[in-house]
Amino acid sequence: MPQASVNGAGWPIETLDEEATAMTRNPYHSGPISDHFDGTRFFNPGQPRTDRRFKDLLKWQFSGERAKWPDHLPVEPATPAARVAGLRVTMVGHASVLIQVAGLNVLTDPVWSDRVSPFSFAGPKRVAEPGVRFEDLPPIDLVLLSHNHYDHCDVATLERLHTEHRPKVITALGNDTLLSRTIAGIDVVAGDWGDEIAFGEQPIGAMGRPDAAPVDASGGGAGDRASKAQRAAIAIVPAHHWSRRGFSDTRMCLWCGFVLKAGGRTVYFAGDSGYGGGRIFRDIGERHGAPDLALIPIGAYAPRWFMEPQHMNPEEAVKTFVDVQARQAVGIHWGTVQLTDEPVDEPANMLVRHLSDAGIRADRFRPLTPGESLDVGET
């Protein structure tokens, strides 16, 4: 039978054996066997297993190598424009980013809760407040949800977004069932790696009311008002990761990244991923073209013997940047909540070093802190 636990960083660990896997029913997804689904659980084809044994968890937790993070980091929250005609991103924190492109407002993995944990009183707590106050958010049209780990899938935030903004949520297989069971009436659609989902041409704004707020054209592009979402296409793309929400549902919901295309601009959101040799990232660049902007994780990577299959480090993030052929990138998944051993500022410092080693200008790949924004001009 599986052995389960939740470690001090809020990371669920489960030992799986073939007998237990065969006996378990997937409560979220039922579909044909594929190159990344065995009929019960999803997996990363051709990659090392992400499952960890309880003894591995103990080895990590008692290694004594965990850096001390500050209890609080200062944040100056941004107040975003209602709409942006070009392409602008604002860092909320961790993997939560506000993307404003061609009049469309998109959130990635939105988390406004104090803790990334199944418990409100225990588990990893954010040291940096959100870079945008929830009440200062512009009308949110779309949410891209990469997977169901608590530092990415915050049901309390998703429920509040549903109540106040009514966005469409796009996610990977199985997560739609998870969200529909917990948030009544949520507008969610799920797809597999390789699927593309169209969005747009419906009224947008809070509670579905048409929104006619002025468009900020300083991010590039044209136009001065927006009452309907611009048409967009969202591709669901592979990532090297895993999933778990409860005590017996390891890898029963799929994980993913996204390629968002709107108004002639392309944004790649990697979600959570190990590097795994880089083939999936080169394939993304070849299939979808060079993105104007890539959101690439740079933190939560230490110790490598434990984290390498599921989280890339800054050196691998630079390789990912090259592989997808991005014009510009923002480093995410760092400096907000401590999940792993590295110091709070090490990901940003190591990113600068590895960019220099690769002969890439530091301003092409910036580790934004909460509240910072970046406008991405056209070529």
Image: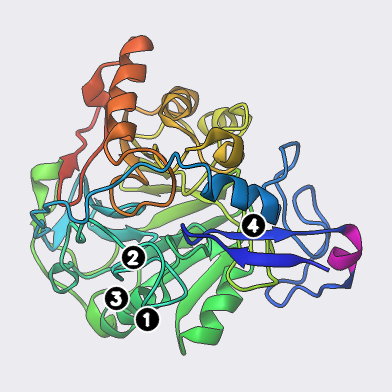
The residue beneath circle 2 is 111
Q: Secondary structure at mark 4?
A: loop
Q: Can residue 265 be seen from the camera position used here? A: no
Left or right for 83, reference 364: left
- Pick whichever of labels 3 and 1 is earlier in the sequence: 1
Q: Nearer the viewer, mark 1 or mark 4?
A: 1
Label 2, secondary structure: give it.
loop
Across and down, in percent, residue 85 comes to 18, 50
The residue singled out by tag 3 in the image is 203
Boundaries of the magenta span: 18-22
Q: Are marks 3 and 1 in contact (CB under 8 Å)?
A: no
Mark 2 and mark 4 lie on one chain; the one further toward the N terminus is 2
Name the quadrant of the C terminus. top left
Please identify the quarter of the rendering in which residue 190 is found: bottom right
Q: Nearer the viewer, residue 171 or 211?
A: 171
N-terminal-most mark, 1 or 2: 2
Label 4 neighbourhood size at 10 Å, few (<14), some (14-19), many (20+)?
Answer: some
